[in-house]
Amino acid sequence: MSDPTRTFAPRYFEIAQALRSRVGKLHPHDSLPSDAELCSEFGVSRMTARAAVQELVNDGLVYREPGRGTFVSPPVVDRQLSNLLGFNAEMRAKGLAPSSVLISAEIAPGTKTQLQMLYLEPGSEVLNILRLRKADDVPLVLDLNTLPAKFAGVLETDLDTGSLHSALIAEGAVPSQGTSTITAEGATQTDAKHLGLDASSPLVVERRLIRDPHGTPIEWTESRYVPERYSITAQFTVELPPQG
């Protein structure tokens, strides 16, 4: 006679729980068994094995790299929205090793949005810098920095290892204040390629406008974050309703 109080969990859930215990004993970037190895170990189909691993991916415990395998994720990087450190300084402050891959840097006619945000005349050119930013060699964010073309001298900096803001200061533009808008969007093909995701995977997208001490826009940036690897925390005050 069956026990009416007993509950049954899907097989993939049981495997995911077993893997959670295993991950807790591993180090960041250690590899997990392949899907084929999990099929053999647990006696399940490849679909069930992938579903189990996807549970851990969804919780940010592991990450997949196409063609390489599945690895233990480092701790989630968290940033306070009230201030903005350069990426390299932010990662080092959290005990992580920052690195960047410069994908492209070019002078091009500005889009309507870029020109509006940077207060540039129609037809003006801008400098677009696209970089993949990593922490402990794990892709975190795809950054598109757009600057007025007059700051093209920043290209003399090694943007794989150097600071864009330091390069801007050398050009006479001091980043001082900014505004930020955060949305959720699906990953594009470009995002998927560089961040190691499936197309249309959810991303946190932050668009920032940085101004100099005089309030003049000097940088418009679109940052596309992998949400399982990066979080943003905001501090705020609570406005009480009118009394009486």
Image: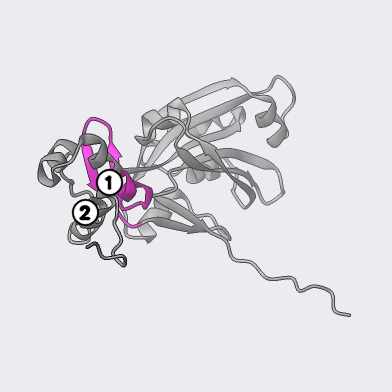
Query: Would you say 242 lies left or right of 226 here?
Result: right
Q: Which residue is at 26% across, 65% downward? A: 3
Give the class, few, some or many, for how many residues have Cα within 10 Å of label 1's Cα (few <14, many ≥20). many
Q: Earlier in the sequence, mark 1 or mark 2?
A: 2
Query: Would you say 211 lies left or right of 12 here?
Result: right
Q: Amino acid at mark 1?
A: Ala
Name the one closer to the observer, 160 or 47.
47
Query: Would you say 26 lies left or right of 81 here?
Result: left
Q: Which mark, residue 19?
A: 2
Residue 137 in sight from this viewpoint: no
Of the 4 image quadrants, the one containing the N terminus is bottom left
Establish if 109 lies above or below 16: above
Give the class, few, some or many, for how many residues have Cα within 10 Å of label 2's Cα (few <14, many ≥20). some
Establish if 80 lies above or below 37: below
Q: Which residues are magenta?
A: 53-75
**Secondary structure found at label 1:** helix
Q: Which residue is at 72% across, 32% downward? A: 116
Residue 196 image offset from top left, x and y in percent: 34, 35
Is label 1 in contact with label 2 (beta carbons under 8 Å)? yes
Q: Which mark, residue 52?
A: 1
Q: Which residue is at 49% across, 31% downward? A: 129
Name the one closer to the observer, 174 or 75.
75
